Structure formats: structure tokens, C-alpha cells
Image: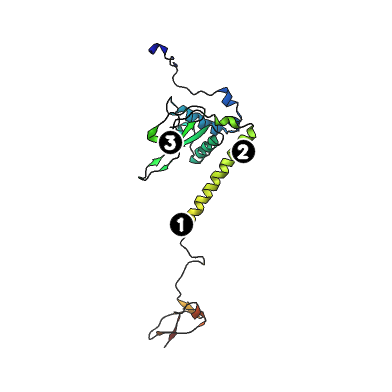
Amino acid sequence: MAGNKAPKDPRGGHVRLYWELLDSNAWRALSATDQRIYIALLRHLRSTNNGDLSLPLSVARHHGITSKTTLAKSLRALQAVGFIAVTRKGGATRGGQRMPTLYRITDLPVLEVPAKHIEARKATFDWKQFASMAQAEAAIRASEKAAEDDAGKTETQGQKMTHTGSEIGPVEPITGSKNGPWLPGPGQKLTLGKCAESAANPMLARVSR
């Protein structure tokens, strides 16, 4: 019945942060920027879209985040200490369309979204697992180390794919001999000759008149 509905807040939507969360070791281990990113995600949370949350840089700019690197680092930190978790990994589709990574807030349930392959699940409260702030900080450092290692592997693979040069340097045409450059003149002809370099290059020639 309509009379049983909770009254709407006259000031509109709001973000709720429980004391338990704010006092947790996981929250204390975050930087101020990490905490801002978490609040930015909560700002876009509705009653049915947990698990379907994303925060592209174009949206993060409205929350004071202007660096793609900073945004990615904070999202990794929030995952490391269990405030958010990935529900769908982003990337490019076969058609070339870019799909964002989707997240869920771990202390809220997730409703199923078949179209986006998001499964229903209960709240997990992953951030409660840290018995100390040091443990949470270690988890963040481990996450950054893993990201650096992945970036290094990607860079190495890219270098192998684009390497086209010779290990001994570029190949250049031979236009002279040890005695100096060959300057062509009238009436000169080429004959194959034997020289010290013939083993390395049997097509070296000498000039005879």
C-alpha cells in the first residue's frame, strides 16, 4: 500500500557511510583520494544498480580526479582492501566497442542483471577481514606491485612484437674497400676478386682497367 512506503528525504538523495566502515582498518589504510573515489561510486549508487557501477575518467573529473593513472590506482586500492569488487572485467568487444569495468559495493547485495552477465549475490563485507591497518596497507602495496609487474610484462611483449632490427646493427651497403672509397671512372670494369673480406662477402669486387 502507498501508505506503507517510507517517506522520501526532502533534501533528496544522499550517501550513507556507517561508523563501522569509517572506523575500520581498511578505511584508515586508504589515501584521501582513494576515499574520494569510493564516495564518488556511492554517489551513483541506486537501489538496483549495485554491481553495475562504473567510474570513467569523464565522470571522475566532476569529483576532482583528473588523472587516469590516479583513478586506476585508487580503484585498485579499493579492491585490495575489499570495499569494491569487479563484477565484469572491461575491455574491447569484437566489434571494437569499449566496455567499462563494472563494480559492486561489497557491503550491499547485488541483483541479477542477465544482459550484463551480473549474478545476484549477498553482501560480503570483504573489508572486515583486516585485523590491523598494517594488513590493509600491505594488501594495497601487493596490489600495486602486481599492477607494475603486469605493466612490465605487457611492455616487454610489445617490444618483442615491434623489434625489426638486427642484433649487430643496421645493414648498410658496401661501397668501398679498405683502401678507400671507389670512385668510378671512364673505361673501368668490374671483375670478381679474392680478398680478405671474401669469406664474409663473396660478392666484393675489385676495379681493373
* Type of amino acid under label 3: Ser
Identify the residue position indicated by label 2 in the image: 138
Horizontally, is 27 left or right of 157 in the view? right
Q: Which numbered disc, 1 or 3, marks the residue closer to the eye?
A: 1
- How far is the residue under mark 2 from the one under mark 1? 35 Å
Identify the residue position indicated by label 1 in the image: 161
Q: Residue at x 63, y 32 (%)?
A: 133
Horizontally, is 182 left or right of 127 in the view? left
Which mark is first along the chain, 2 or 3?
Answer: 3
Q: Residue at x 50, y 51 (%)?
A: 155
x and y, in percent, of residue 69 in the image: 50, 41
* Type of amino acid under label 1: Met
- How far is the residue under mark 3 from the one under mark 2? 30 Å
* Label 3 crowd bin: few (<14), some (14–19), many (20+), radius 10 Å: few
* Label 2 crowd bin: few (<14), some (14–19), many (20+), radius 10 Å: some
Give the position of the C terminus as an image quadrant: bottom left
x and y, in percent, of residue 31 in the image: 57, 34
x and y, in percent, of residue 103 in the image: 47, 34
Identify the residue position indicated by label 3 in the image: 58
Q: Residue at x 52, y 47 (%)?
A: 150
x and y, in percent, of residue 95 in the image: 35, 45
Horizontally, is 112 left or right of 35 in the view? left
In front here: 76 or 89?
Answer: 89
